Image (cartoon, grey):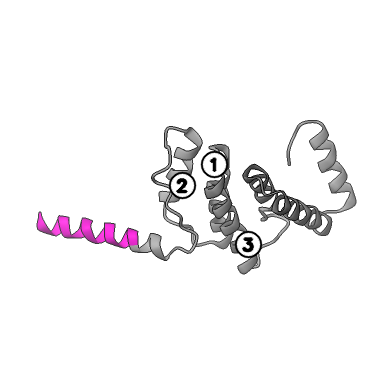
Amino acid sequence: MAVVVVIIAAAVAGWWFFLRTDPGYLDISKLNSQDTHVAKAQQYAKQSLPSKSEDLAMRYGLIAAYLYAGKEYTYSEHYYLTAQKTVEQRKLNQKDYRFYQGLSDTYEKLGNKAKAEQYKQKEKDAIKVNYSAKEIQQMEEMKLNGRSR
């Protein structure tokens, strides 16, 4: 019985050490989990981090998107910035992994128009660099038809 208690205590201590050493970790456990989106973000934040860079960036982006949907914009900002930093530091493909639009939308909600415009421009620049004129035209048509990419 004592061995089980020690093992559980060590696991909990290891988990908290892990969370404190994760540079992207921000405690969201105290947020209103009655909101379905926030609860989903909390669920993903509790899971162990993926080792693959692409999955890590997507995990942070997913948490950010759920927090944004739950109107927790300050927390969403943190996780979007962490996702984008992961993309840049690990040199991931900007065509597949970028979070500029999420950051732009978040800054818009936070009332920071200058930052919102800065990230909106970064998104436009990334699209120009990573997509052909035909692909950009198709994306614009999808937007006009109410579908996102």
Q: Which residues are the magenta region?
A: 1-16
**What label does residue 44 carry, if any?**
2
Residue for badge 1? 66
Q: Nearer the viewer, mark 2 or mark 1?
A: 1
Q: Nearer the viewer, mark 1 or mark 3?
A: 1
Mark 1 and mark 3 lie on one chain; the one further toward the N terminus is 1
Quarter of the rendering occupied by the C terminus: top right
Q: Amino acid at mark 3?
A: Val
Q: Residue at x 59, y 53 (%)?
A: 80
**Image-based side of 82 in relation to 132, left or right:** left
Residues at marks 2 and 1 touching, judged by CB atoms closer than 8 Å:
yes
**Image-based side of 134 in relation to 56, left or right:** right
How many neighbours does mark 2 have within 10 angstroms: few (below 14), some (14-19), or many (20 or more)? some
Q: Residue at x 73, y 38 (%)?
A: 148
Q: Residue at x 42, y 52 (%)?
A: 27
Q: Amino acid at mark 2?
A: Tyr
Residue for badge 3? 87
Q: Residue at x 38, y 62 (%)?
A: 18
How many neighbours does mark 1 have within 10 angstroms: few (below 14), some (14-19), or many (20 or more)? many
Quarter of the rendering occupied by the N terminus: bottom left
Spatial separation of the CA atoms under disc 2 and disc 3? 19 Å
Mark 2 and mark 3 lie on one chain; the one further toward the N terminus is 2
Residue 111 counted in the magenta span: no
